[in-house]
Amino acid sequence: MAIYRFPTDLRGGYEEDKKNNDAYIKIDILDDVNSQATETIALFAPSGFTIEDSGNYGSVNFGVADSISNLGRDVITNAGKDSKGQIGNMSTAESQLITQAVLKAAGADSEIMTAQTAKNKIVFNNKTTATFEDMAIRTFSFTFKMVPESDKDSTAILDIENVLRTNMYPEASQSGYALKYPPEFKVTFYRGKEVDKFMPKLMKCYLTSLSTQYNSNGNMFHKDGAPTDTTITLSFQETRQLRRGDFKPDTTSEGVS
């Protein structure tokens, strides 16, 4: 398995020198058979990481259904009683609301409903309630500004860029009529060889965007033609919606040594 790292002296082991216990991001490119890493990229942990967990919610109005239901219940409850007296005890507001509920349930024209509301000077309580639909698929991104300090660093940056770009594209079938999905990625925060418990757990994902900027500080190059700095922005989208059980601790991950 090929391992690419920047900076090239980035270490993931627990040495006596605590400076070597680096915080970094491990990006595994997975095969489509058993989800094992075929290539690994280790990069310094960037600042300002943001991830948003969100759900999709709609709404439903219970007002009409409740009003019709309550009206029917009252009719049944008061069956055999003095219906004239019951109607006489009903307030004007209640009778108007029942009229609106019946009109709305019957699919009355909105203009009729508006006229009815304006005439009676009373509005129908829709009893709007939030309804859960599903969870949004999470997306996240990283920006790495890489400034090489040696020829080895420049080569590492070029290799990392090429590996990421190659693996975000699909592969064509032999006939050319179909495209095979690009590889899945697994992104994990590490400190040394241990998963960083203070950072969020990220699930399998696809690399959806790769943006590369060269020489952000000026049009200068090293003597071998390598840019003086390269900024790479990676955007990922997880492969599916998540459930509560997905956040159980994962003890199978191993860092880069």
Image (tube, rainbow, N blue to C red):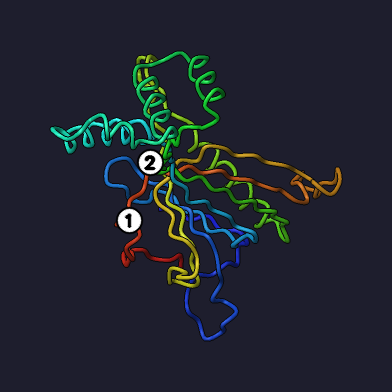
Q: Toward which corner of the image does residue 102 lie, by quadrant?
A: top left
- Dot 2 surroundings within 10 Å: few (below 14), some, or many (20 or more)? few
Q: Is residue 190 above or below residue 101?
A: below
Verify CB contact (< 8 Å) between mark 2 and mark 1.
no
- Residues at marks 2 and 1, CA–CA distance in whole angstroms: 19 Å
Q: Position of residue 208 (x, y in %)?
A: 52, 37
Q: Is residue 113 above or below residue 256?
A: above
From the viewer's side, name the closer residue of 21 and 150: 21
Which residue type carries mark 1?
A: Arg
Q: Which numbered circle lies on residue 244? A: 1
From the viewer's side, name the closer residue of 18 and 190: 190
Residue 178 located left or right of residue 45: left
Q: Nearer the viewer, mark 2 or mark 1?
A: 2
How many discs mark residues in the rendered view? 2
Q: Is residue 58 above or below residue 194?
A: above
Q: Which numbered circle lies on residue 131? A: 2
Which residue type carries mark 2?
A: Thr
Q: Position of residue 110 (x, y in %)?
A: 49, 17
Query: Which residue occupies 17% across, 38% down?
Result: 77
Q: Element at badge 2?
A: strand
- Dot 1 surroundings within 10 Å: few (below 14), some, or many (20 or more)? few
Query: Which residue occupies 50% across, 36% down?
Result: 168
Q: Position of residue 146 (x, y in %)?
A: 69, 55
Q: Which numbered circle lies on residue 146? A: none
Q: Element at badge 1?
A: helix
Residue 134 located left or right of residue 54: left
Query: Which residue occupies 51% across, 32% down?
Result: 122
